[in-house]
């Protein structure tokens, strides 16, 4: 039974398109996420232009740092009013710390008729782990990353971890 489960997890991890650089992180994501929406890798996102970035973390996390031009939409208090001015045909990328919360928000957007919504696989942690830039609440470059908590923060290998708002 355990061997079958392990083989199934490895098969999922090896066959999915989106990946992260750390094998253990990748395996955790493959088993934690439901893969119910399109997933986009950090490399793929870095090449895109004209996308709408939505940050599905909590406001304190967003204020510490976020991707340039990302809009805060939150998770616990998310509602469709926060996206009412976004064209449903736009390319929308949702992210959070690792991808779980953003996957749930992306599911809601997909159900609401957004045609081109994707979840950033590995989230802001993988964005930073691959050397990409963040900005703070004043839109100035920063190395600070809200690491959510010490359990989840293990997946953040670069940047300066922040645990308090």
Image (spheres, rainbow, N blue to C red):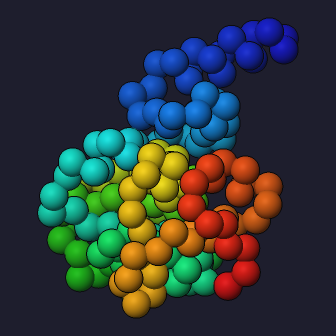
Residue at the (39%, 56%) spot, across then down: 132
Q: Position of residue 4 (x, y in %)?
A: 75, 10
Extreme residue in the bottom direction? 138
Residue displayed at 62% across by 66% down = 160
Report whether 60 appears left or right of 113: right
Against 34, residue 51 (above or below) is below
Looking at this view, name the residue that lies furthest to the right.
1
Q: Quadrant of the N terminus?
A: top right
Residue 57, x across and y down, in percent: 55, 71
Residue 72: x %, y % from top left: 43, 79
Check the image and report above or below for 5 versus 49: above
Residue 41 appears at what percent x and percent y?
38, 42
Residue 6's image quarter? top right
Q: How many marks?
A: 0
> Quarter of the image containing the C terminus?
bottom right
Q: Residue at x 28, y 43 (%)?
A: 44
Left or right: 26, with 130 as reference point? right
Please tell me which residue lies in front, 23 or 84.
Answer: 23
Q: Can residue 95 be seen by looking at this rendering?
A: yes
Work out whether residue 125 or residue 28 is closer to the camera in this orientation and state it.
125
Residue at position x 51%, y 18% from top? Answer: 14
The image quadrant that residue 59 belongs to is bottom right
Is residue 21 placed above or below 106 in the rendered structure? above
Position of 47 with respect to 110 (left or right) is left
Can residue 37 be seen here? The reply is no
């Amino acid at each position: 039974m355990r061997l079958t489960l392990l083989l199934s997890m490895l098969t999922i991890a090896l066959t999915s398109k989106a990946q992260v650089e750390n094998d253990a992180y990748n395996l955790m994501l493959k088993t934690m996420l439901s893969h119910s929406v399109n997933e986009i890798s950090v490399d793929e996102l870095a090449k895109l232009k004209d996308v709408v970035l939505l940050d599905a973390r909590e406001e304190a996390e967003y204020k510490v740092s976020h991707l340039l031009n990302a809009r805060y939409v939150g998770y616990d208090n998310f509602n469709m009013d926060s996206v009412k001015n976004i064209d449903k045909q736009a390319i929308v990328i949702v992210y959070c710390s690792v991808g779980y919360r953003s996957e749930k928000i992306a599911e809601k957007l997909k159900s609401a008729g957004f045609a081109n919504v994707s979840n950033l696989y590995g989230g802001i942690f993988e964005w930073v782990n691959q050397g990409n830039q963040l900005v703070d609440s004043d839109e100035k470059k920063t190395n600070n990353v809200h690491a959510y908590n010490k359990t989840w923060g293990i997946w953040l290998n670069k940047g300066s971890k922040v645990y308090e708002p």
